[in-house]
Amino acid sequence: MNSKVFGSILIVAGTSIGASMLALPMISSSLGEIKSLFLLIMVWLLGYYSSLMVLKVNLFYKGAFSISELCKKSFDFKIWLIADLSIITLFYSLLAAYISGIVEISMLENMPHSSNLLSNGVIGYLVVVILVFFIIFNFKVLDVSNRIIFVMKIGVFITMLYFLSSKVELSNLKNFNGYLLQNNDLFKAIPVFFTSFGFHGSIPSIMKYLDNNEKDIKKAFLWGSFLSLIVYCLWIFFTSAVLPKYGLISFDAVNNSDNKLHELIKMLAERTEQDKLHVIISVFSWMAIITSFLGVGVGLYDYILEKFKFKREVFKDQLKGIFITFFPPLLIAILGKNIFVKALAFAAISLSMLAIILPAFIALKLGQKNKIAIIMSLILGMLIVIIELVNFL
């Protein structure tokens, strides 16, 4: 495995293991570990197969294009407008959630000797600016910075699981399964679970980086998404085994709070009676969101440059690209309140269009093999859209 493939695997995993991962315990708390595990595996297979559909369509056209460009090449009518709307909606929703998460976690008001920089989130916005620089500078710089952050994130994740393991109670898992008889939130979980494997926006960038080598690209998609699956399973197991469903310190209290992400971190620290765990989980959460921000940010930035025919080397075009890419989600994050989980769930609608529905239509139009699998994925993609629309009603 060469260095570029390894870096691409980490970009796929880093894009997936982000803000949506932090929402998994809150969403899956009403499912129980068995249904959560089954759902994760099914969604992972769907996400991986859909990435192969996008890859094959790109290889057919001998390039690495956004789904909008692929629609233009495949259909005479303006179906690409749907793709454009889905891309903008998806990426803006995700980036708004990531910016909101970065700022929320940076507001450690309960830290000793916390300054105004910590309490009002200025450091969070400063981190966002630094990440934008990594995105626009060079993909190689993005790759190296992502590797460093990802390795650190896995190290912090293992440390976090070590502290959580001291308070694991298997009886909590039984309580979750008992809760299934009273309330089943499977439909609410599916969109967020699917978003957790939403690395598809960075596919064109990864393909260009790997010189459209099909074998290497498939490795990146498979092992990057599989690594995400393993981390998710461990994360859900430990959080579900540590936090009970009901009580003052519980998932019920987390789900009823105004700031769910902050409350989850706080409750896990209180449950384990480890003050340092609050900092460890905060650092991990920040790193998880940062790697997602890098993967999604570069995907949207490349799309904007392609769409408006901006030249990467021209400073004026770079400024235009930065403004169009990052200002709208920044504004949404500033004006929005408690949008973390809601933005991730809303993104599932657009992600289904971009990662499954439109690629499936293109694949059928081009007469690609495995029509039954393509049609099945198309039906599942439409089901995710319907479920999320119903959830919003």
Image: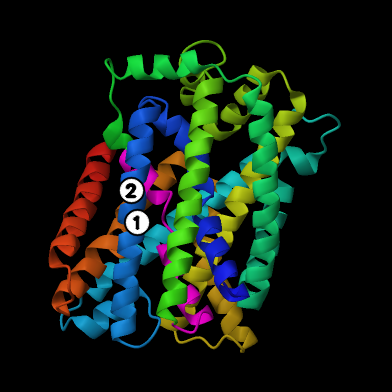
Q: How is the image coloured?
A: rainbow
**Residue 337's spot in the image, x, y percent?**
51, 39
Q: Which residues make up the magenta segment?
A: 190-212
**Residue 256's spot in the image, x, y percent?**
47, 22
Kind of residue sitting beneath label 1: Gly
Write down the residue under mark 2: 43
- Name the residue located 37 percent from the left edge and 59 percent from the top edge: 89
Kind of residue sitting beneath label 2: Val
Question: Looking at the image, which is closer to me, 336 or 279?
Answer: 279
Confirm whether the magenta stretch covers residue 199.
yes
Under circle 2, the secondary element is helix
Q: Quadrant of the C terminus?
A: top left
- Name the residue located 62 percent from the left edge and 19 percent from the top edge: 167
Q: Is residue 212 visible?
A: yes
Confirm whether the magenta stretch covers residue 301.
no
- Name the residue located 72 percent from the left edge and 56 percent from the top edge: 126
Write down the residue under mark 1: 47
**Residue 56's spot in the image, x, y percent?**
30, 76
> Given contact means CB atoms under 8 Å apart, are the residues at marks 2 and 1 in contact?
yes
Q: Is residue 107 visible?
A: no
Under circle 1, the secondary element is helix
User: Mark 1: few, some, or many residues within 10 Å (few <14, many ≥20)?
Assistant: many
- Residue 317's place in the image compared with 344, above or below, is below
Question: Looking at the image, which is closer to me, 312 or 247?
Answer: 247
